[in-house]
Amino acid sequence: MSSPRNLRCGPSRPHTDRGSAVITVLVLAAVTAVIASSFLFRSAQEAKLAGRTLMDSVALNLAEGGLEEGLYAANSSTFSSADGWALASGSTTDYVKSITSSFDFVQGTGAVYIRVDDATSLNPIVIAAGVVTIPNQPRIVKQLRVAGVKRHLWTNGVVSRGTLTFSGSAAIEG
């Protein structure tokens, strides 16, 4: 009788089939790694863009705050150096102000630059820029311009769509 075959191992395979399982596993692992790295890259890009979109809104809010600062100064005629205002270079009626501190965010820093042209006239023009600086990225700048009209303190003290009728001893000063 010949020696019995080891039935647990099965018939012997040809030498060419032995490495195909290893190559298949390596190819699948490589494809999985490429897909995973693509997802990670896209996630990082999305996080970066979401942060930049947030800072874009922050820059607009800084510019709006600069407009408020300029309009307040124009309406109250308080363009003093104690409040941070200075005459614009080469002008006697234009004022500028820079606020570059106190705007520290997690992703970067902010600044506000304000200019009020014809500040002492009845029609001042306020230009404000909100700037956000993010490390290793381009700056984000939002600029707003508003032309205003100063009104006298009691310009619209009494306003009516129709006729006003006063009784008794009413008096209106003009």
Image (tube, helix red, strand yellow):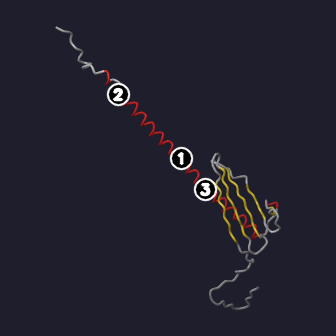
Amino acid type assigned to the residue bearing label 1 in the image: Gln
Q: Quadrant of the N terminus?
A: top left
Residue 45: give its label: 1
Residue bearing the label numbered 3: 56
Amino acid type assigned to the residue bearing label 3 in the image: Asp
Residue bearing the label numbered 2: 21
Q: Mark 2 or mark 1: name the one nearer the start of the chain.
A: 2
Local secondary structure at mark 1: helix
Q: Residue at x 71, y 81 (%)?
A: 157
Q: CA distance from mark 3 to mark 2?
A: 52 Å
- The picture quadrant where one finds residue 167 is bottom right
Local secondary structure at mark 2: helix
User: Is 133 or 68 nearer to us in this picture?
Assistant: 133
Q: CA distance from mark 2 to mark 1?
A: 36 Å
Q: Is residue 33 above or below residue 8?
A: below
Q: Is residue 123 above or below residue 98?
A: below
Q: Residue at x 67, y 55 (%)?
A: 131
Q: Is residue 3 above or below residue 57?
A: above
Q: Residue 65, percent across and down?
A: 68, 61
Is residue 18 rendered to the left or right of residue 134? left
Q: Mark 3 or mark 1: name the one nearer the start of the chain.
A: 1
Is residue 139 rendered to the left or right of residue 174? left
User: Is 101 or 93 nearer to us in this picture?
Assistant: 93
- The picture quadrant where one finds residue 142 is bottom right
- The picture quadrant where one finds residue 59 is bottom right
Contact? badges 3 and 2 (CB < 8 Å) = no
Is residue 163 rendered to the left or right of residue 89? left
Q: CA distance from mark 3 to mark 1?
A: 16 Å
